[in-house]
Image: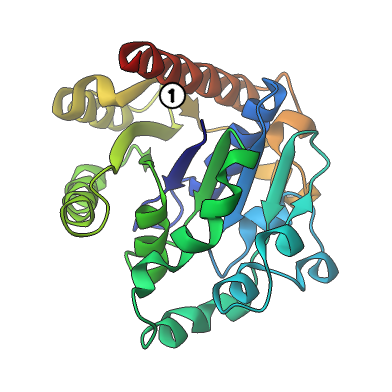
Amino acid sequence: MSHIITIANQKGGVGKTTTTINMATALAAAEKRVLIIDFDPQANASTGLGLTKHKRIINVYGLLIGHYTVSQALVKTIIPGLSIIPSSIDLLGAEIELVNIAERESRLKEIIAPYKSMFDYILIDCPPSMGLLTLNAMVASDSVLIPLQCEYYALEGLSYLLGSIQKIKKNFNAQLDLTGVILTMFDRRSSLCQMVADDVRKYLGDKVFQTVVPRNTKVSEAPSHGKPVLIYDLKCAGSKAYMSLARELLARDQAKQNIAK
């Protein structure tokens, strides 16, 4: 059964795209069929996987406005088992163009529904906002994963985001759940980082992943080479963290399936 996960945070620079790319790569390495939907007009997930502008001509914007099908927009990456629907700057206009469409918040859900069975995991990388694109992603998803940078304003922004998720669950997608929160860019030498991490764990308990992604130079370098850090440097601390995160996600999903049985 496919698990569709929105990776979201209205704050930029917290590691959404990095988490999307590297968790998808780790899941593919675990022999899962994985699709990334790059739903951010900045298209960082696309470029971070080495897609040139030429390979992004057919993209998620054309998908939303009905010019292409999912099959036409799919691009296989260098990682076996991992595909992506790329993005482009054109997606900036989608929020305006969707305004007059009936049930506009369900547009992405309707488009990908016939293709869900092709994948074990579909990860949607969202823009740093709570606009119509992020709403579409959450309506189409089973759950939300929140990358959270350990900084002073983290809890304030997290509270707002969790409130938004509850509103979407109440009004548009009753099945929407919180997959969890992943602490990113963690510096063990910083007392502030540790304090924020402790506060988040106190607030959300086991919804916070045990895995913590450290601040790591190799993670920052990898996108400039068009590769996930797991391909760029498998042995670095960032790669080990994302492999651990994928194992933790798989274990959580397996536990849920066992309970459902």
Asked where in the image residue 55 lies, by quadrant, the reply is: bottom right
| Vertical position of residue 146 compared to residue 157: above or below | above
Image-based side of 6 in relation to 63, left or right: left
Question: Depth check: 67 or 125 in front?
Answer: 67
Q: Residue at x 61, y 70 (%)?
A: 63
For the C terminus, the image quarter is top left
Q: Provide residue 9's location: percent of width, then percent of height.
A: 36, 52
Question: Can residue 215 be seen?
Answer: yes
Image-based side of 109 in relation to 167, left or right: right
Q: Which residue lies under the disc numbered 1?
A: 212
Quick one: SS at disc 1? strand
| Vertical position of residue 39 compared to residue 200: above or below | below
Image-based side of 72 in relation to 174, left or right: right
Q: Residue at x 67, y 66 (%)?
A: 69
Q: Residue at x 73, y 56 (%)?
A: 74
Question: Depth check: 185 or 189 in front?
Answer: 185
Q: Provide residue 90's location: percent of width, then percent of height.
A: 61, 80
Protein image colouring: rainbow
Question: Depth check: 121 or 111 in front?
Answer: 111
Q: Provide residue 219's location: percent of width, then percent of height.
A: 64, 37
Answer few, some or many: residues within 10 Å of disc 1's Cα (few below 14, many 20 plus, some between 14 and 19): many
Image-based side of 99 in relation to 192, left or right: right
| Vertical position of residue 177 compared to residue 65: above or below | above
Question: Can residue 39 be seen?
Answer: no
